[in-house]
Amino acid sequence: MTAHGVGLMARQEIRTRLRTGRWKTLLAVWFVIVNGLGLLLRLALEADGTSEFGHEGVPMFGGVLLGVLVLTLLVTPALGGQSINGDRERGTLATLQVTRLTPGEIALGKLAAAWGTGLLTLLLTLPCVLWPVVEGAVGIGRAAVVLLVIALLIGAVCAVSQAWSALLARSVTSVLMSYLTVFGLLVGTALLYMIGVPLTAERVDHGDHVHTNEHTERVWWLLAPNPVVVLADAAPRLPEREVVIDGRVYERTPASDPLGDLSREVRDIREGDDGDEHAVVYSSAGTHTYGGYNRSERDDQKSVWQYGLLFHLALAGGSVALTRARLRTPLHRVPRGVRVA
């Protein structure tokens, strides 16, 4: 396997994609919709006027990046979900397999083409993403990190979609499975966490009431693969300031920060209710919550993004290996209804 072979396959795949005019139209529509939504969000933040110190760029940056991540992951399965079985249905895959290109070069070349198209969609969102950077609300380092994380997540989803395309005979089925995989990562992980919290909670019966302690530190890992969690927790923190509320010291960012707020919530979940517990008591008088959570006492080292990112990279590596194995020739067993040439 050589870089020349991978590049040759990638160029051929990109030429095939560009032969139709639909891509230009879709990219133009994508550019208008994403940047239009970013502009509307900024106008809404300025009209609301509730951002601290007038830093509308910080919530705009976080909101736009979360929206861009979800939208790109919803578009990505269509980029690689039929790259293998689509060629097989058209009878062109066998032509590639009898050339001097190795299965690894074919797999990585097609992946590079799909990933490059996904990165192009990310590039078209830069006007609204870099707006807060230009006005100084967000540092260039923070913007670079979150864009890099999104790029890696796009590549991982492209690899998984391509693996489904190599594994399944029909392109419609592989695209559907690719979308179900993205749905599982975005929504399924959150649902599993919500189910796991009450299952791992401890309930102590005191006779007149039941004392329940939720141990989120036992199930935090269910949220780690979630792409939204990975992005938010990987974003570098904004400078924080201390405020005193009811005699207790809390740390708050100087402006509403969707990425930072979500990151703190996830790290709190990993740390669990240790010491300063949120104890929920169910009694005949109703439901009450005792205790609070002191932000200054939170361990800032309880990050989860590295585990989620490693999960996605391992998933991508396994998907590429599976695709490579499915492209090996000669074929000793051909699935029913599969067109070879």
Image (cartoon, rainbow, N blue to C red):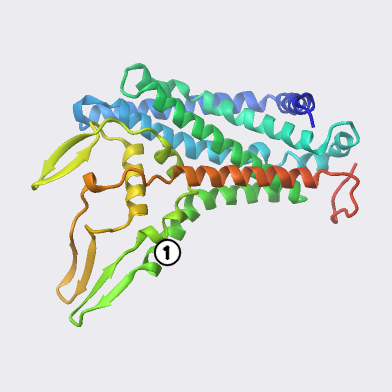
Quadrant for residue 282, please give it: bottom left
Image height check: is 181 above or below 240?
A: below
Left or right of 23 on screen, residue 84: right
Left or right of 128 on screen, residue 175: right
Farthest residue toward the left?
Answer: 247
What residue did someone put label 1 on?
195
- Where's residue 333, x and y in %? 88, 55
For the C terminus, give its image quadrant: top right
Residue at 44%, 52% in the rendered image: 223
Q: Is residue 204 visible?
A: yes
Image height check: is 244 above or below 269?
A: above
SS of the residue at dot 1?
helix
- How packed mark 1 is, by other alpha carbons closer than 10 Å (few <14, some 14-19, many 20 or more), is few
Quadrant for residue 283, please give it: bottom left
Q: Amino acid at mark 1?
A: Ile
Q: Is residue 41 visible?
A: no
- Where's residue 150, x and y in %? 51, 34
Farthest residue toward the top?
Answer: 134
In depth, the one of 253 and 36 nearer the eye is 253
- Where's residue 57, x and y in %? 31, 25
Instruction: Tell me how many marks there are.
Output: 1
Farthest residue toward the bottom?
Answer: 207
Residue at 59%, 31% in the rendered image: 118
- Where's residue 124, x and y in %? 52, 23
In depth, the one of 89 and 317 nearer the eye is 317
Residue at 52%, 50% in the rendered image: 185
For the N terminus, give its image quadrant: top right
